[in-house]
Image: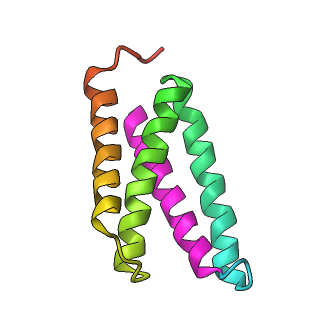
């Protein structure tokens, strides 16, 4: 399977886990709490498999950057958490950083 697809799946599971973390209400709700543990477990497993091919710094930058942006969007859409212009600008800078890494970095798969 494509390494970048695995990385995107890791981001998706991390996003599910973080969304469930919000829904668990500080681990006081059972099923969302179970989902947190399972989703993070799958996410970290998938993340670890990408390290066979890509450098850890690049993997972590992409995983965390995409995760931050997706969680901010989910927070806005699902949980009604407002984003002001500085937050939107910061998220745009994170996405810009991801693009710079992907398009211009000399860090190559090993």
- The correct choice, above or below, for 41 with respect to 76 in the image is above
- The correct choice, above or below, for 38 with respect to 25 in the image is above
The answer to if 91 sits in the magenta stretch is: no
**Does residue 14 appear to the left or right of 76 in the view shown?**
right
Main secondary structure along the magenta-highlighted residues: helix
> Where's residue 92, x and y in %?
28, 50
Name the one closer to the observer, 96 or 55: 96
Q: Residue drawn at (36%, 75%), measured in percent from left and top?
A: 76
Q: Residue drawn at (50%, 49%), measured in percent from left and top?
A: 10
**Does residue 17 appear to the left or right of 5 in the view shown?**
right
Q: Which residues are magenta?
A: 3-24
The answer to if 12 sits in the magenta stretch is: yes
> Where's residue 69, x and y in %?
38, 56
Q: Residue drawn at (34%, 78%), measured in percent from left and top?
A: 77
Q: Residue drawn at (39%, 71%), measured in percent from left and top?
A: 74
- The correct choice, above or below, for 30 with respect to 54 in the image is below
**Does residue 51 appear to the left or right of 1 in the view shown?**
right
> Where's residue 37, x and y in %?
69, 64
């Amino acid at each position: 399977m494509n390494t970048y697809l695995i990385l995107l799946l890791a981001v998706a599971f991390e996003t599910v886990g973080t969304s469930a973390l919000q829904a668990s209400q500080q681990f006081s709700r059972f099923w969302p709490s179970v989902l947190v543990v399972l989703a993070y477990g799958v996410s970290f497993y998938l993340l670890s498999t990408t390290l066979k091919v890509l450098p850890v710094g690049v993997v972590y930058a992409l995983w965390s950057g995409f995760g931050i942006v997706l969680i901010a969007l989910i927070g806005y859409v699902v949980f009604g958490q407002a984003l002001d212009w500085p937050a939107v600008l910061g998220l745009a800078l994170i996405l810009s950083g991801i693009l710079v890494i992907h398009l211009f970095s000399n860090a190559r798969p090993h």
